[in-house]
Structure formats: C-alpha cells, structure tokens
Image (spheres, grey):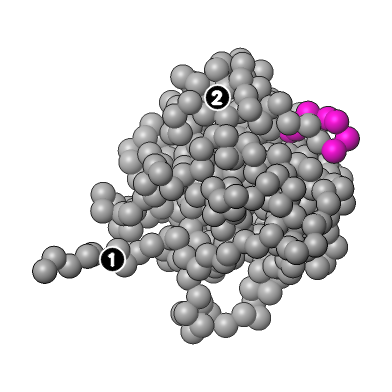
Amino acid sequence: MSERVIPLIDQRLGSLAARVPTTAIPATGLLGDTLGRPLRDLRISVTDRCNFRCSYCMPKSIFDKDYPYLPHSALLSFEEITRLARQFVAHGVQKIRLTGGEPLLRKNLEILIGQLATLRTVDGQPLDITLTTNGSLLERKAQALKAAGLQRVTVSLDGLDDAVFRAMNDVDFPVAEVLRGIEAAQAAGLGPIKVNMVVKRGTNEHEILPMARHFKGSGIVLRFIEYMDVGATNGWRMDEVLPSAEVVRRIHQELPLVQLDPSAPGETAERWGYADGSGEIGVISSVTQAFCGECNRARLTTEGQLYLCLFAAQGHDLRALVRGQASDPELASAIAAIWQGRNDRYSELRASLPPDAATGTRRAEMSYIGG
Ligand code: SAM
Ligand code: SF4
Ligand code: SF4
C-alpha cells in the first residue's frame, strides 16, 4: 500500500469558514471593526512564490525545492480577485496594494491591474493602486504596468553595497539591476516611488547612511522598516531589531531632519524631512512603536483567505464563497461580518503575549499573506 506524504511545513494553516450572515449587512462604506477602525486598505497577494530568498522572509533552509507552494488551481483567478475587491471597495477600501511573494512573477498581472483600475470608491473616485516588488523584473515591466493603470510602486532594497545586497537576497542578485528597475519605474511615471529597507542589526545597518545619501534629493521616499517577528521560519530575535529611533538618530547626525505630520490616518510610516528641504524619509516601527490603533488594513491571500492582521494565525476562507453560490451582496455581507468581529492588535500586545512555542501558535508567513 502506498503512503501519502503530508508535508510538515504548510503555510495553509487554520482556515476559518466565512459565513453569509442571516441578516444582510449593506455596503455603505462606513464599516468599522470592534475597535472602530474603518476598512480602507486592501493588500492582495497574487503569488506565494519569489525569486529571492531574503533570510527575514523566505529563508532558503525552509523555502527550498521541496517547499509545497500552492498549485495553480488553488490561486484566485483575476476575475475572482476583482469580484472580491469590488466588495471590499464598497465597504470603504480606497487603496489596493498588490504584493506576494514577488507579484511580478504572476503571469499577465497587467490584466488584473486593468480590471482593478475600473473600480471606483464609494465617493466615485479611482482607487489608489500600487504594488510592492523586489524590483528584479521592474526594468522589463514598468512601462506595461503603467499602461495597465498602476499608479506607483514601492521597491524593496536592503542596501546599495553589491555584496551586502547579494547576501540579503541570498540568490546572488546584483543591486545594479534593481537600481535600473527603479529608474525605469521613474521614467514610466510610476511615482511617487517609495523604497523600503528592512534593517537588521549587524547585517545591513551600515547601509543606512549610504542609502539615505543616495536617495536624498531624488524625489524617492526611502523608508526604514524594523525587522519583524512575522511568520514562523525566520528565526527572529529582538536583538537583531534596530529601533527606528536609532535609525533617525544616525541619519540626523549627518543629515539634519525635522519631523513631519502624518500624510493620512492609518499611515504606517512616521515621516521625517531633510532640514534643507531636499526630500523626506519614513520609519516604520512595527516592533518598538505599535500603530494598531489606526490599522485599517485587510489582507487577501493568493488563495482567497482574508487575514485581519499581519500576525494572524488564521484566515477566513472567502474562496469557498466565491466558488460556491454566493451572490455579490452575500459576499459583501460575509466580508462585513468578518471585519465587524475584528479585534486584532498584535503589535500592541506583543510584549505581554506568551511565546508562540508555548501556545503552539503558528503564524502565517509574510510571503503567503503579503507584506
Ligand atoms: N517581494 C516583494 C518585495 O519584497 O517587495 C513583495 C512582498 S514582501 C513580503 C513585502 C515587504 O515585506 C518587503 O518590503 C519586505 O522587505 C518586507 N518584509 C518581509 N519580511 C519582513 C520582516 N520579517 N520584517 C520586516 N519586513 C519584512
Ligand atoms: Fe521575496 Fe519579497 Fe520575501 Fe524578499 S521580502 S523573499 S523579495 S517576498
Ligand atoms: Fe495592524 Fe496587526 Fe500590524 Fe497591529 S499588528 S498594525 S493590527 S497588522
């Protein structure tokens, strides 16, 4: 008798059934969760695959050739994504970010962008459609993405030194190609461009100042992200987190900074401007300064699971509804009921929670739920 091999590492954890409530919840754009937080920002993961192996996200030891990535039949089609996105928008979403995995690996992504670009907010405005990418395929794709209706991009870049960058992506990818991708995005009008740098103490902290100098005056906003304890595979340790306050202090010593007002409610980055008026930087302090109080973000995974927090261990299965008999108003009601029950605020609670190992909690991977 042949045995079925069950993979030990499976990111498709703890799915909750999404139910259509017996009383319909109309989409008014005014939905709030248990803490009164609105739903404004939807992050859609379009693939769980990536051509990089950043150690803080998809370490090679786990994400190897035997890793059980999702089969194509499990992925939401572009039509299914757009249908779901339309219901989120009716509940107040104004901004959609495509992510992954590496979103530019998803074939014909321009078609999805074109479909999403036809959606309108409850006030009749076009959506703010953006994409987070590692930049490796951007030089080739920037023009087509813009033509399809993408407004801007955020590029992840963890250093300018080629050796440091190659080590961080762990597939020996040269930094020059990402820099050319950023230039191509600028030339295509995919701005204002943001560049995200995850700072790991002892690994790339010496790249903070070269990165700041490089992007100062370029019109590109460089944002420093604290290394987070997301997922269950990156071996996160608090002593590898360099607090944002320290990043600001180091830059300010050489390039004086002044604090700026937040650009929008729920904005994750704290903004700092160069005192000489030559642009701004941002810091995202998810570990040292929780910002759950205004968190208005929902995440839709590649296979249609709705996650209410980056650190959630369970998603709500919307794909079953989409592939079942649910009508659009039923889908909208189901999404509303889930958001109305939301009480997630992991970053605020982090310090007081028992370790995951003690409770048996397995958090979803960043490459699965989308950053
Ligand atoms: N592959 C694309 C990219 O790298 O831009 C999009 C997906 S990636 C998961 C989204 C963002 O999450 C990237 O900016 C990445 O640097 C960030 N990220 C991944 N793991 C992280 C971690 N442990 N702590 C902080 N940021 C992380
Ligand atoms: Fe890939 Fe982005 Fe994760 Fe790096 S951070 S491994 S580029 S998904
Ligand atoms: Fe939002 Fe969860 Fe992050 Fe808090 S920890 S800001 S609720 S995603």
Which region is colored magenta? 122-128
> Magenta-highlighted stretch: main secondary structure?
loop
Q: Is residue 160 visible?
A: no
Does 97 appear above or below 235? Answer: above
Q: Identify the residue shown where x is 55% and y is 24%.
A: 110
**Residue nearest the observer in this picture, 361 or 184:** 361
Does 349 appear above or below 100? Answer: below
Whole-angstrom CA distance, mark 2 to mark 1, is 35 Å
- In this rendering, the count of numbered labels is 2
Residue that mark 1 sits on? 6
Mark 2 packing: few (<14 Cα in 10 Å), some, or many (20+)? some
Question: Quadrant location of residue 228?
Answer: bottom right
Name the kind of residue labelled 1 in the image: Ile
Circle 2 SS class? helix
Q: In this view, does 103 lie to the left or right of 89?
A: left
**Residue nearest the observer in this picture, 166 or 363:** 363
Does 37 appear above or below 154? Answer: below
Q: In this view, does 56 lie to the left or right of 216?
A: left
Q: Identify the residue shown where x is 30% and y is 57%.
A: 61
Does 119 appear above or below 368? Answer: above
Q: Which of marks 2 and 1 is in front?
A: 1
**Image quarter (top left, top right, bottom left or bottom right) of the N terminus:** bottom left
Q: Where is residue 60 in the image (x, y as percent from the top left)?
A: 32, 53
Q: Position of residue 238 (x, y in %)?
A: 54, 69
Q: Residue furthest front?
A: 325
Q: Where is residue 324 in the image (x, y as percent from the top left)?
A: 56, 51
Residue 342: numbered disc: none
Residue that mark 2 sits on? 110
